[in-house]
Image (cartoon, helix red, strand yellow):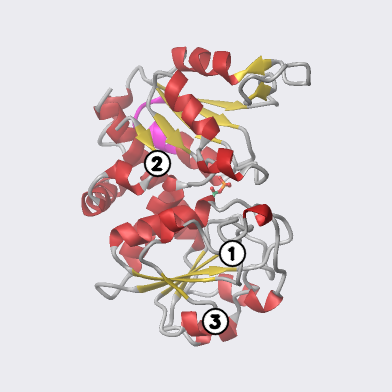
Amino acid sequence: MKQFLYASDIGSISEALAEAKAVKATPFAWKHLGADRTIMLVFFNSSLRTRLSSQKAALNLGMNPIVLNIGQDSWKLETGLGVVMDSDKSEHLLEAIPVMGSYCDIIGVRSFASLTDREADYAETVLNQFIRYSGRPVISLESATVHPCQAFADLLTIEEHRTKARPKVVLSWAPHPRALPQAVPDSFAEWMLAADVELVITQPEGYELDPRFTSGARIEYDQMKALEGADFVYAKNWSCPGVTRPSDYGRILCDDRSWTIDAAHMAVTDNAFFMHCLPVRRNVIVTDEVIDSPRSLVIPEAANRVVSAQVVMKRMLETL
Ligand code: CP
């Protein structure tokens, strides 16, 4: 595997889930694969789970992880092409990427969306520069429009807890005080559709996700109606994807707290499990009562981030 951004990069979803279960059962069985190998984990943005789970996955495989926080540990990097570099950014990605590539065997990159330039974000401009110039396999550790390690872990968590062949999974928009990217809901929808669960997406008008990730999902603007009979409720905020009005891209269009997932929302489900990728704003996205309930999967979901990252790194090591 040379790059990991999309569900299609993993190939057969059922084979990937079987491999994930094997890796989870015997995490150190492939330690020989990473001997004398190095993974560079490059962070343009803050992270708790991705940073730690990626390091743990690399260590389980016998690899040496190097973590670089851009702008804190390194020079500030210019990402735009053709710019006159007279700002505070001392180095261009065009030099920094091949230099980083020369120090490692695999690169993982966390680089959020700008939320100001839809075209550049949806072209995955920063991540694609790593793919083009590093000469190494590249993992998206949440880039502008996708968070595949999260979606793979979410799918594994659903696989471990489902009691029906085709569970009903509801992706629900929820309010948030800051404008957030669409990477998590984009990848979640993409992976659920690839796994063939019954996916329903509910959001206020104007928050329609890019159809390249959601084609085939049922869209329901009435949140309570969407949640009826759900087996899994996946809450997430995202800012306006700019699908219907490009000028609204990255904006907050709604702060309606009736979308916060509370006990009344969960009561119309089929005793659903609650999921969220974390970090989560308590009593904004979800009430304490719901996230602290026995049906909350947020911790096992986060724990599975090690497993998803390890499967991806293992496959990359096998093809080096
Ligand atoms: N879910 C997730 O990616 O968490 P972090 O931003 O803390 O890595």
Give me the C-alpha separation between circle 1 and circle 3: 13 Å
Disc 2, disc 3: CB below 8 Å? Answer: no
Asked if residue 63 is among those painted magenta in the image, a careful observer would answer yes
Q: Toward which corner of the image does residue 113 lie, by quadrant?
A: top right
3 relative to 93 in the view: left or right: left
Q: List the residue tagged with mark 1.
A: 207
Q: Is residue 121 above or below residue 21?
A: above
Between tags 1 and 2, which lies in front? Answer: 1
Upstream in the sequence, badge 2 or badge 3?
3
Q: Is residue 75 magenta?
A: no
Work out whether mark 1 precedes mark 2 in sequence or the reverse, and give the earlier one.
1
Answer whether residue 65 is visible to the viewer in this image: no
Query: In the rendered view, does 134 fall on the left or right side of 24?
Result: right
Tell me where residue 139 appears, x and y as whole percent.
Answer: 43, 34
Q: Nearer the viewer, mark 2 or mark 3?
A: 3
Instruction: List the residue tagged with mark 3.
Output: 222
> For the residue marked with disc 2, what is the amino acid?
Ala
Residue at the (29%, 48%) spot, across then down: 20
What's the amino acid at mark 1?
A: Tyr
User: What residue is rendered at 42% in x and 30% in y?
Assistant: 138
Q: Secondary structure at mark 1?
A: loop
Q: Real-space Cα distance between discs 1 and 2?
A: 29 Å
Q: Is residue 48 above or below residue 71?
A: below
Is ligand 1 closer than 8 angstroms to the Cβ of mark 2?
no
Please give the range of residues in magenta.
56-64
Q: SS at mark 2?
A: helix
Mark 2 burial class by Cα count in 10 Å: few <14, some 14-19, many 20+: many
Quadrant including the N terminus: top left
Instruction: Specify the label residue 247 is tagged with.
Output: none
Q: Amino acid at mark 3?
A: Asp
Q: Which residue is mark 2?
A: 309
